[in-house]
Amino acid sequence: MKCYVGIDLGSTTTKAVIVDENGQTMGHGITNSRSNYDTASRVAQMEATISTRLTLFRQALDSIEELQGNITELLEDLERYFRLELFLEQLDDLHKTSLKSARDLSVFSGGEDLTEALEEIFKQLSSTLELLFAPGAKRKSDFFRDLAGSAYMQVGESVARQLGLSFDTLLNIYDKSIIEVENRPPADNLDDKFIRALDRVLKQSGLSEEMVRKQIQSALDEEIDASYIVGTGYGRVRLPFPKEHIRSEILCHGLGAHLMYPGTRTVLDIGGQDTKGIQVDENGIVANFQMNDRCAAGCGRYLGYIADEMNMGLHELGPMAMKSTRSVRINSTCTVFAGAELRDRLALGEKREDIVAGLHRAIILRAMSIISRSGGVSDEFTFTGGVAKNEAAVKELRKLVVENYGDVTINIDPESIYTGALGAAEFARRAGTENTTPTERLQ
Amino acid sequence: MNTEVIKEASMVMQKEMITRNYDALTSTEESGRKIASTFVPGNLNELIMSFGMLNNLPEINAIQNGMRKKSGPMIMDAERQGHSEDVCTYVKADIGQMSKGNIAPNGKPMPSPDLLLLSYTGCFTFMKWFELLRHEYGCETVMLHVPYTGDGVVTDNMRDYVVKQLKEDVIPALERVSGVKFDIDRLRENLRRSAAAEDNLVWVLESGKNVRSPIDAYFGGVYYLGPIFTAFRGTQEAVDYYRVLRGEIEKRIEQNLGPITPEGDMPEEKYRLVVEGPPNWTNFREFWKMFYDEGAVVVASTYTKVGGVYDLGFRHDPDNPIETMADYCLGCYTNRNLPTRVDMLANYVEEYQADGLLTNSIKSCNSFSAGQLMMMQEVEKRTGKPAAFIETDLVDPRYFSAANVKNRLESYFQMIEQKRAQSRVA
Amino acid sequence: MALKDIIERCTVLHEDMDFNAAKEWKAADPDRKVIGYLPVYVPEEIIHAAGMLPLGVFGGGEQLEVIHGDAYYQSYICRIPRSTIELGVTGRLDFVDGMLFPSICDVIRNLSGMWKMIQPEKFVAYFDVPQNYADGVGGEYYTKELEHLRDGFAELTGKPITNDAINQSIALYNQRRSLVREVYQFRSEYPWKALASEVYVLMRAGLVIPVEEHIAMMKEYLAAANEEDRPLRDACRVVINGSFCEQPPLNLVKTIEMAGCYIVDDDYLLGNRWLLEDLPTDGNALEVLASAFLHHSADTAAKYCAKKEEVGQFLLESVKNNKAEGVIFAAPSFCDPALLERPMLADRMTEHNVPHISFKYAENSGQMQPIREQAGTFADTLKLWS
């Protein structure tokens, strides 16, 4: 199957989308951007490939009459076990890398042998972490770094105490090793892992083994031929792609939003490091754009900073702000001053939720200015980027858009984080297929 | 990098002119000549020369220091002395240069000026800048207040006011400091030479109207303007320079060549742009290369009009020597109101068949920058051509983010491409 | 009227970004017109003589949320033009019949052109003042500019503006000038009775109501404040400098006071006392206004100082006359004139052993902690020295 890949290298996450020859989205994947964009884009592409496989599985299984009603569960189980396989492989890598780092460290410092401690940590890790992939278990994140990291902290601390070792040294080893592991290109034997995962699924389900296996195998036999890749996003210049395979994120965002909602005329994207206001025409072609100026005030990072200041998770900010009954006016969207302003307000006795609500309003006010600068809102409006997932931000935005531009349709897709990558994939498709219309072939 | 850069005769000439001028400035102790410090927009070079005086332009020194990557430490020096991080970095580079021994770009100590000739055109900062310099040097200062053309026209009252100041304040001050009596005929001669050079300058700038422009009217434009904006307007050297330059450009047109750039001849002309705002000096070459790499040629710019808007018809007029100087000062680009600037930009986009307007917004320069976002929208509305906005600074290296600028430029060029393809289909 | 009521009325006027007082004035007679102006100074007498109301538009203050205004300006430009634009594009100034943008800096200057594009049908003018102070040069130029302005107003109202009418207005504004001086003098003598934050709103009210009302208001204020029995505090006496254009939030004024400083002079709302003396009312009114501007007007960084030794003299005299112990340089962020001039003023203060500190603000500054900290420390240091 011929596929087209779009990769969006953001400052915090890297996203990939795979579309087929007809422009149908087959799969998408996301990973943290790391310090190595090359690996990040390969991991994101791998994730999108996995997601594409699952789509193919579903299509294959859909034809089996007797499976109807069970397919979703089956595929969820399959993915869960597949993830476990993948996870254990990386954990094994981390294990080996840690031992090597420990050896290097002790040769270097003439220090103690940490092998025993590491063996113990990883023994405990693999059993505790495996539970994260049990049916119904909730994972805080899907990134290996996050899952392995927090477990390592817990286990490592108690092991260090038991064995009378320095926890800092163990932490050092982890820090060094995780970077190595994370930046290693992903292994590509995905099919074997799917088969092993399938074995596990079938062992515990009462489904007709032969039929499922045949369909899954046939879906696995379908080659995913990623013939054309287009990269975009802030890190795109770092991609080892030829120039014609690189598109500005503005264009990709505009096109992506158009594909999701063809009526879109204005796009607002609030990302980690920048905020973009984009005007597109009826073909998804960018007519005008504005980004936040040199000063990054009011970008997604601002909320991240506030979350750090308040010792909260980023995802907890929105829900907290929603509890507010009267939002506090915050005038500074300067990230540097945000902490000070926050403490000032707390000292004045303002409620945390009211302050946080005010901060959300402040960031959206900035975004409104950028929209205004790009030409305002005349018709359908699409909000994308990480901040679009934040309900408090969305609430403020809706209010302000209506106040300033009247009753326009506001689109927010839960998958909006993939907007740029989708646009890039579509650019790849248009460049790579012959049978597109002249308008579509535009670059 | 190109090791064997081919120098055109005009480039060699200009380099020699600048060197000679700095040498003249740094050897006044021997020559006994007097120096007037003054500014580029609205400078009175013909008048200064008629008293046998030299001119020293603090902005040009700051630019030279910026291009030689020396301005950063100078600015920080000035900030340590109490100058705000918010204000113009030309001023701070100038003050920093003084505190570093006031070394001229030729490596020799720059003598203190004998006169601060504050012809304050199109920018309020100039006024305080010279007060700051007076604060340091304590030398005689004479002010020429050039009113802003708020309604877009030069009124008789404005002209009379400037003429009166020239007659009653500026000329007597120059006589006093130079010890030379005012000679109107000498002034007329200088003005005549100015007009001759201006004719050829306009021809060169308007060569950007050729599709396949032989010049870059922003990065290259800076060089073409060098002599006429600085110490050479009114000299025979400038007349010669512009004649030679014109010859070179004529040849480029015949040969269908694009602009000369530091990377070599521009191989293709993919995008034609009009640029508003001064360039960044600290990363000048890197900045230019971003355009070169994309095949973007600037066909017209407003920065090349800060020292005089000659393409709209103004020429120094030897028959009305004092009035012509007043008109010159009143007409400089940043002394024109915003509706007039919008008109100019929209006309440039049309007349030079540009793909759009790019604004380089300079943090230091509110005279240019305040209102640029609105100007851009107006030009877009009128021409239907897309516009884009980037931000840098004059000589503060801390305000040049290459990744940021490149990102926006790329987005802009791709947007132009997309629009173009769309109109081809339609 | 009780002091509390006067101040309350002033505070309402100060915070009202819909300018209801001016709207009511205008609504009372269909022939009435309102002319808005930005800081620092315009000759209000001419507007008044034309039967119009001069309305000070001094930014959007602390409360106005700026959305569209930010779309017009980069982050490195001060706040007053953005909030002014916001007032304009949100329709709050639609009732205003004309706008004057005085010559103060490049940003306000350029705003005049922007306004011409935003409201092309309105009377919009850049109001230039001379930087040359010779009667025959700057004076003549300025007089003609004033004539031009007068003729513009006459065209707007359809009625000529006579010399007599301007002279009558000058007489009225003389009254106001002398009362303003009296209020400042009163505060300088009894700073514990006349709080800076109260004087501020009293002066601010003068921007948005007819001069006749302001005159009455100041008289009532003086009477009421004198009656007030407030305890003398152990505070030091400071002069504020650099706040002549974009105004600080009222909270900032209060914060400086609460941190232990009596503000005995300032350059807030300087237009109210721009002309330092009473003007003759029997001459050529425009020449009188011009001459007063050239020879008897207040100083700010927006003016050229013709002689090196005169730089900072105006501030120094204010320090002496008001027996101030120190100077607080408080300028708006990105204010070119104030920030460029500050090092020269600071040097002049140092030469004369006047202690000084400096900080920046914006009209919507939210954090007072750093200001409290700095002003408090300054006050403590001044006490130690004296």
Image (tube, coloured by chain):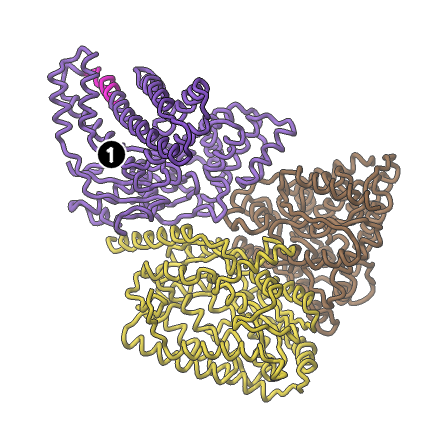
Chain colours: A purple, B yellow, C brown
Pick the front one: A227 or A363? A227
Pick the front one: B356 or C281? B356
Name which residue lies at 60% across and 32% down. Answer: A343
Specify whether A316 is left or right of C325.
Answer: left
Span colored in magenta? A68-79
Asked if A370 appears above or below C293 in the picture, the reply is above
Q: Residue furthest bottom?
A: B185
- Main SS of the magenta part reads helix
In the rendered image, residue C228, in percent from the top left (x then y), is placed at 86, 36
Q: How many marks?
A: 1
Residue A131 can be seen, yes or no = yes
- Say which quadrant the N terminus of chain C sits in: top right
Specify whether B285 is left or right of C328.
Answer: left
Specify whether B179 is left or right of B377.
Answer: right
SS class, disc 1: strand
Specify whether B395 is left or right of A64.
Answer: right
Q: Amino acid at mark 1?
A: Thr
Q: Chain of mark 1?
A: A
Residue B154, picture quadrant: bottom right
Residue to which mark 1 is pinned: A25
Residue B244, picture quadrant: bottom left
